[in-house]
Image: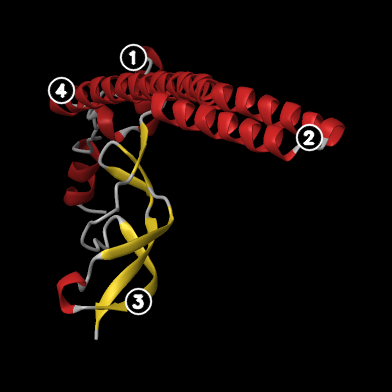
Amino acid sequence: MGLRDKDSEKKKFSVHDRRFWLDEDNLDKLAAEQGEKRVPTYVEQLQQQLEEKNRTLQEYIQAHKESVSDMDDVRKRLEDDLQRRLDIEKGRLVEPFIEVLDNLKRLHVACSNTGGAAELEQGMLLVIKQLEEQLARLGIEPLDTSGQRFDPNTMEAMMTEEVDAGRDGMVIEEIRPGYRLGDRVVRPAGVKVGVSR
């Protein structure tokens, strides 16, 4: 061994690495001390913003669910109210015809007991008049077809008859009466129409 070996023994040195982030044991200790891993500040801000947006979104979703529920309740209430009104109107519409039906039953009983043709005719005329009055109260009016030109909007041609040229397209006879409710045709009149030779 020479001089160099002695010098190298004297000059031995040791390196102690003090970079704590490279030591896994130190990292675990630091994480335990701080409670959690530290995240850079910008990322923390983004996470907070994301949490706020999620909270706001959940509030909007809840508000939407409540408004949809409220709308369903309103829709159901309106449907029930409409059905109730419809039932009331049906009752008002049927009420006059019940009276006419009662009179027809009385007429039937009277005819079966007496058998008189004159009483039958008079009773039938009274019931017809009563029914026409009830229809007029509801706003249903008969269509006037006598002496009119044939109108396909309010009339239905059931028959034709040959006539001279002056009466071509005119109503010759009303076979079945028609009725209107305001401007709406409830039933078109069935008529016989004149056709020129």
Q: Please name the amino acid that badge 3 sits on.
A: Glu
Residue 161, above or below 174? below
Instruction: Report whether 74 appears left or right of 185.
Output: right
Task: Please name the residue shown 32% across and 18% down the image.
Answer: 59
Quarter in which the N terminus is drawn: bottom left
Instruction: Report whether 142 appears left or right of 112.
Output: left
Quarter in which the C terminus is drawn: bottom left
Task: Please name the residue shown 24% across and 20% down the image.
Answer: 52
Look at the numbered disc 2 and give the secondary structure of its residue.
helix
Task: Please name the residue shown 28% across and 23% down the image.
Answer: 51
Q: Please name the amino acid that badge 2 sits on.
A: Cys
Q: Residues within 10 Å of mark 4 (few under 14, many from 20)?
A: few
Q: Which mark is residue 34?
A: 1
Mark 4 vs mark 1, foreground winner is 4
Residue beneath disc 4: 41
Report how far apart the C-alphas of labels 4 and 1 lie in the structure. 15 Å
Look at the numbered disc 4 and give the secondary structure of its residue.
helix
Q: Which mark is residue 111?
A: 2
Q: Please name the amino acid that badge 4 sits on.
A: Thr
